[in-house]
Image (cartoon, rainbow, N blue to C red):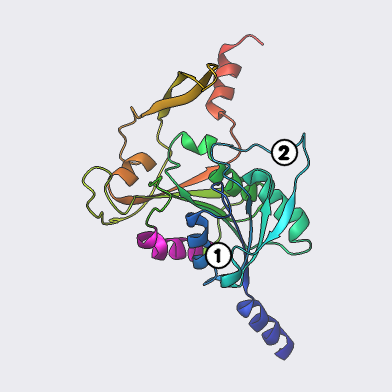
Amino acid sequence: MQKAEKSQETNNTKKSLILVSNDDGITAKGIRELVEMMTLLGEVIVVAPDSPQSGMGHAITIHMPLKVRKSDVFKDLGVEAYECSGTPADCVKLAKFHIFKNRTPDLVVSGVNHGSNTSISVLYSGTMSAAIEGAIEGLPSIGFSLCDYGENADFSHVRPHILKIAEQTLKKGLPKNVALNVNFPARFDKETKEEQEIKGTKICRQAHARWQEKFDLRTDPYGREYLWLAGDFVNPDKGEDTDEWAVNNGYISIVPCQFDMTAHHGITYINNEWDI
């Protein structure tokens, strides 16, 4: 009996091991905010890109060598950190199979991203690819994003919410192979510059929206033409249960995501309608 009680006590006091990554690069303000928060919940190890990797989606590096080296960027926080030449998905793979060796993270968190990752942006997001990679490996994973693209964005209003969501994930867990896509409203309204109050949290679906893209044709100083991707975000989805509606109305949006992209209704349609 005493042995069992001692074992139970050890399990209860075990410190959580938390992997932190992002796509804005290891020196971004958002990842420092996230690292500071996670040190309140457990032992933190950072493996993040050595330069910005936004929009990389779930790309992995297969045609060139990966370079990983220790970084002292979080030395003041007493946090072990590594910077990687690869993508966010590379960082999570390297962490699990190379850096962590025989240890398994209790939680993978990515961000805090400078900018929204709602709706279709989740497909392009390096922030979410790190979280999804964690989910592929069966690890509870969260991607955090702030709807403010500024390099010096104010993250102070989201700190308690990050802690609460991460704590709940550590305590209650997530369904297997599910990652959370969490988006926070910016602290200040983009147009009025007035401070915005966070009204609460909504568990949402991903809005059916898209980017209406165009390519700007430009000329470099040598007279050579090049193209620059631009575009506008178009949201015809007026549902009030979406991530877009939530963040635009002062709420935190949480969308549970999975990497299984099977269109099950497509299976039914093809089986019923095709002669195959």
Cβ atoms under marks 2 and 1 closer than 8 Å = no
* Residue occupying the point 36% across, 40% down: 244
Indicate whether 9 appears above or below 210.
below
Is there any visible trace of residue 22 in the rendered image?
yes
Is there any visible trace of residue 137 in the rendered image?
no
The residue indicated by pointer 2 is 61
Give coordinates of residue 64: x percent, y percent: 77, 37
Give coordinates of residue 175: x percent, y percent: 57, 52
Give coordinates of residue 59: x percent, y percent: 65, 36
Q: CA distance from mark 2 to mark 1?
A: 30 Å
Toward the top, the furthest residue is 275
Q: Residues within 10 Å of mark 2 (few under 14, many from 20)?
A: few
Which quadrant holds the N terminus?
bottom right
Give coordinates of residue 72: x percent, y percent: 64, 64
Toward the front, the furthest residue is 222
Question: Which is more N-terminal, label 1 or label 2?
Answer: 2
Which dot, 2 or 1, sits closer to the camera? 2
Which circle marks residue 79 in the picture? none
Residue bounds of the magenta highlight: 155-169
Which circle marks residue 170 in the picture? 1
* Residue occupying the point 46% across, 61% down: 165
Q: Residues within 10 Å of mark 1 (few under 14, many from 20)?
A: some
Tag 2, which secondary structure?
Answer: loop
User: Residue 157 magenta-drawn?
Assistant: yes
Amino acid type of the residue tagged 2 in the rendering: Thr
* Residue occupying the point 57% across, 16% down: 272
Toward the bottom, the furthest residue is 2
Examine the image and state in which quarter residue 19 appears: bottom right
